[in-house]
Image (cartoon, rainbow, N blue to C red):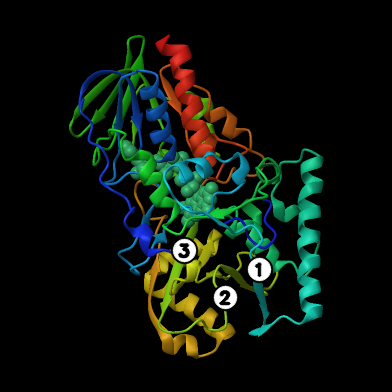
Amino acid sequence: MPASTPYSRRAILGGIASMPMAPALASNPSGDVDVVVIGAGIAGLTAARTLMDKGHDVTLIEAADRIGGRAYAETATFGQPHDHGCSWINHADTNPWQEIAREHGFDLLDHTSAGGAHFVDGERANAEQRRSYDHAWGTVTQALMKAGRENLDVAASTMMPDDPTLGTVKTWMGPMDFSVDFKDLSTADWWNSADSNKDLLVPEGLGTVIAAFGRDIPVRLNTPAQAVTWGGDGVRVETPDGTIHAKACICTVSTGVLQAGSINFASGLPVETQEAIGNLPMGLLNKVSLQFRDTRLGFSPNQWLDYFVPNDMPAEAVYFLTWPFGYDFMVGFIGGDFGWELSRAGEAAAVDFALEELVRMAGSNARNAFVKGHLTRWDSNPFVLGAYTAARPGRFSARAALARPVEDRLFFAGEALAAPYQALNSGPYFSGRDTANRVIAQVLS
Ligand SMILES: Cc1cc2nc3c(=O)[nH]c(=O)nc-3n(C[C@H](O)[C@H](O)[C@H](O)COP(=O)(O)OP(=O)(O)OC[C@H]3O[C@@H](n4cnc5c(N)ncnc54)[C@H](O)[C@@H]3O)c2cc1C
């Protein structure tokens, strides 16, 4: 989630030297190990590190050609660090990534009180429009809090008063923050998600921090798990390079991958686990970034730029982070149903849409100075298939259900089951670490 949004609940070139390096290669590529970990995103890396630190044999396999999963930064597109996935260290005082980033020598920017510009019909909001916008934040938040206090797990849309001024806020809190529209946002998921009172950004991109953390963890890249079987004597994970035998398996792939059936859980998952996977679909948040030459278009770096949208959902909107760290591109965020639709239309359509919306606010200078755009495609990345989970309304309990081990052999971990830190980068860290410790206690001791 972008978070640190205006009201969310929740020296660059020096840094390029510390961009991701090649990860360590696994020295024990096959055979019997204590634990096989599937997926080298945050949860998988953390689980592997926890097990290794306590002296256990681990084989970590990763389908992609890089580690990090949904944490990924690169410089190839714009010549400056560009995070495709997570960027913010939210709830920083309790988020382990703050300390890890500092230990690895990264500077952090406090982005908690980032200012923002709000536009109405292409003009900066006047005082009255600004007041109306502020009031809308209170109205939407109060309605969701009412549901939370009453322990309701219903669609957020059912709690909203009929008020035409709420569209921008609903778009922030739905598609931009939780990756789904209000009709698909569980009020229990919203209520049981960690609040953030400190949000940090990393000039080199947060993906670079996670790559640095994982650099010395042995991993077998380009090695997808194809089938998993388990029983009294342990677990077998089939890959194109052979079968790995282990006492336990920690599977950290997204629920998008689990729902797609990319891994055959051939011994048969319990009904409760299958239902949990079905009730934790992936929402979508994509970033559409636009690069410009020799202009700031009247906006300061590291600010939010949003605009009035009608009350309808799905909202056809893109909100921007302006010039992160003074780089020459802006990052637009497009999520929810409209995000899926626009991504299906392709990168060119998404870039056109974002540029036109920006031109309405910044004028035709924006078109003249435009260099190029880029769309992250988390929905079509076969190893992720969405951005992060949104529990179906009424099904928040699926997060806990997915965390229950299967016959003390197969353990799931990752963002999806890490409430109240779901959809964040802290959640998979805690989930990977805690699941590894559980495996040690329940299987390896
Ligand atoms: C656009 C976007 C913006 C975000 N912004 C923020 C933010 O600002 N702050 C924040 O806290 N969080 C944010 N998040 C959420 C955060 O990035 C995720 O919650 C977190 O990275 C998920 O980590 P994970 O380990 O659970 O899963 P993943 O990162 O998905 O890791 C799973 C790994 O499994 C691999 N895999 C898949 N299939 C197989 C297979 N068959 N065999 C082997 N390996 C396989 C994948 O390639 C991947 O590496 C954002 C996410 C997105 C997409």
| Residue under label 3 | 287
**Image point 78% across, 48% down: which residue?**
145
- Distance from disc 3 to disc 1, alpha carbons, whole Å, reads 20 Å
In the visual, does 60 lie left or right of 337? left
Mark found first going from the N terminus, 2 or 1 = 1
- Distance from disc 3 to disc 2, alpha carbons, whole Å, reads 19 Å
In the visual, does 411 lie left or right of 136? left
In front here: 345 or 328?
328
Q: Looking at the image, is 53 positioned above or below residue 74?
A: above
In front here: 182 or 245?
245
Residue depth check, mark 3 versus mark 2: number of the one nearer the observer: 2
Ligand 1 image-quadrant field: top left
Considering the numbered disc 2 on the image, is that residue within a helix, a strand or a loop? Answer: loop
| Residue under label 2 | 300
x then y, percent, for residue 146 = 82, 47
Mark found first going from the N terminus, 3 or 1 = 1
Q: Amino acid at mark 3?
A: Lys
Mark found first going from the N terminus, 3 or 2 = 3
**Image point 76% across, 70% down: which residue?**
133
Q: Amino acid at mark 1?
A: Gly
Q: Are marks 3 and 2 in contact (CB under 8 Å)?
A: no
Q: Is mark 1 within 8 Å of ligand 1?
A: no
Residue depth check, mark 3 versus mark 1: number of the one nearer the observer: 1
In the picture, the disc for residue 115 is 1
**Image point 69% across, 52% down: which residue?**
9
Q: Are marks 2 and 1 in contact (CB under 8 Å)?
A: yes
